[in-house]
Image (cartoon, rainbow, N blue to C red):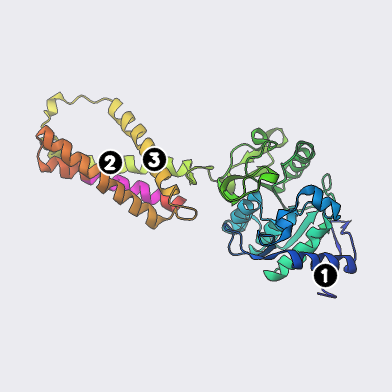
């Protein structure tokens, strides 16, 4: 690594330490970590601590005794994984833009930004070991990242995108961060925050949030070994200097990982399909249902109830699709899920009820055909949107 370790600055702020110190930290990291791919961002390989390394087991007092700050760089935290996943899945957020990864730790989010096509990426932290971790991890993933060791809160280097993962783990830091992040957003920067919902996360200020997943750690307010919900909120300028916009102009992902807007669109499309279906089959349906046309009085109530029922169906369908697992909300899976739910519940229920009620198979075929179309339309839209 000699001669290849950056020690410059960014935005007028210099990084700390020379090559010799950086080399010493590099050697320490190599001796106490192993290559690991975080579960929610397997595209990225990081040098992280595991149960096989003593670093994993050391308490904060033991770390202080050997002169080592808490090794946040040695773990892929919940918010960082969620934020990195979001950046990789929506590269247009950072593509061609200057990016600051605040409190970079291992450099996970910074690496994701570089891989997503950012014009430049600065990875900042106050722990000098993070600079060594960033150098090593960036090299493993074939990207160029500038490590910066400095407390940048209050500074503005003109970054177009600011990424902050797992930064709301203590109240004093949270109180310093929000005015700074809000000011950056107010002057036009895109600010993305990733966090598993820790106590000091100002959820009210951030507003609507996306659901991302990651593996956290109890020492940072998360929970190692299980999935956490991570917030990924986009702060943009607006009334009063700050507002929270939906990611990429879309409504928030908030149920089973599927957008409420997708549920609404699916319900509207299914309602329109139902109107067309029964308009085209009105006469045979009236005969099959044994209705007297003279007794049918136009009223809006059935239409309102139908639309509300479609919203509920869409919400449940979104939950089923979302629980297929991360990344499984697709057009194909949405169509298959809709078909299976129709075949298992709707078609069978109509068949049984109509037999007890004495109706003919013509009514069953008409109604079942309608609900098949609804299930496929809603499943397809929700899956595709996901």
Using the rendered image of the protein, determine whether residue 144 is visible from the camera's viewpoint: no
Q: Secondary structure at mark 2?
A: helix
Q: Which residue is mark 2?
A: 274
Where residue 338 sits: x, y (%)?
A: 33, 49
Look at the image and say whether residue 380 sits in the magenta stretch: yes
Q: Residue at x 85, y 67 (%)?
A: 24
Q: Residue at x 68, y 59 (%)?
A: 108
Find the distance from the CA under tag 1 to the CA under tag 2. 64 Å
Find the distance from the CA under tag 3 to the CA under tag 2. 19 Å
Residue density around tag 1, few if under 14, some if 14–19, many if 20 or more, within 10 Å: some
| First in residue order: circle 3 vs circle 2 | 2
Using the rendered image of the protein, determine whether residue 43 is visible from the camera's viewpoint: yes
Residue 5: give its label: 1
Look at the image and say whether residue 186 sits in the magenta stretch: no
The region drawn magenta spans 369-382
Nearer the observer: mark 3 or 2; the answer is 3
Q: Which picture quadrant has residue 221? A: top right
Q: Which residue is mark 3?
A: 316
- Front residue of this view, candidates 337 and 140: 140
Residue density around tag 2, few if under 14, some if 14–19, many if 20 or more, within 10 Å: some
Q: Residue at x 30, y 25 (%)?
A: 301
Q: Main secondary structure of the magenta part?
A: helix
Where's the N terminus, which quadrant? bottom right
| First in residue order: circle 1 vs circle 2 | 1
| Relative side of 81 to 371, left or right | right
| Relative side of 264 to 200, left or right | left
| First in residue order: circle 3 vs circle 1 | 1
């Amino acid at each position: 690594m000699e001669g290849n370790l950056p020690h410059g600055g960014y935005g007028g702020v210099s990084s700390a330490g020379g090559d010799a110190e950086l080399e010493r930290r590099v050697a320490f990291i190599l001796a106490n970590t192993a290559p690991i791919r975080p579960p929610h961002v397997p595209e990225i390989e990081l040098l992280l601590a595991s149960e096989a390394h003593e670093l994993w087991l050391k308490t904060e007092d033991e770390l202080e005794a050997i002169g080592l700050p808490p090794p946040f760089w040695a773990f892929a935290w919940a918010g960082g994984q969620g934020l990195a996943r979001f950046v990789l899945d929506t590269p247009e957020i950072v593509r061609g833009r200057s990016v600051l990864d605040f409190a970079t730790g291992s450099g996970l989010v910074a690496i994701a930004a570089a891989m997503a096509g950012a014009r430049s990426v600065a990875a900042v932290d106050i722990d000098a070991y993070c600079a060594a971790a960033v150098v090593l991890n960036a090299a493993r993933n074939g990207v160029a990242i500038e490590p910066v060791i400095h407390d940048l809160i209050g500074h503005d280097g003109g970054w177009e995108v600011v990424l902050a993962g797992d930064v709301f783990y203590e109240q004093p830091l949270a109180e310093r961060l929000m005015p700074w992040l809000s000011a950056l957003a107010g002057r036009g920067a895109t600010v993305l925050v990733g966090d598993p919902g820790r106590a000091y996360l100002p959820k009210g200020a951030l507003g609507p949030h996306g659901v991302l997943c990651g593996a956290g750690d109890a020492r940072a307010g998360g929970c190692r070994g299980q999935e956490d919900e991570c917030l990924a909120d986009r702060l943009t300028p607006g009334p009063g200097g700050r507002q929270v916009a939906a990611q990429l102009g879309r409504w928030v992902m908030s149920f089973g990982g599927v957008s409420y807007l997708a549920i609404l669109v699916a319900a509207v499309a299914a309602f329109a399909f139902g109107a067309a279906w029964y308009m085209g089959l009105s006469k045979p349906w009236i005969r099959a249902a044994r209705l007297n046309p003279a007794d049918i009085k136009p009223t809006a109530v059935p239409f309102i109830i139908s639309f509300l029922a479609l919203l509920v169906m869409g919400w449940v369908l979104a939950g089923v699709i979302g629980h297929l697992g991360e990344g499984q909300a697709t057009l194909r899976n949405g169509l298959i899920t809709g078909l299976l739910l129709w075949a298992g519940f709707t078609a069978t229920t109509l068949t049984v009820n109509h037999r007890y009620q004495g109706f003919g198979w013509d009514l069953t075929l008409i109604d079942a055909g309608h609900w098949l179309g609804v299930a496929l339309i809603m499943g397809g839209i929700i899956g595709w949107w996901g």
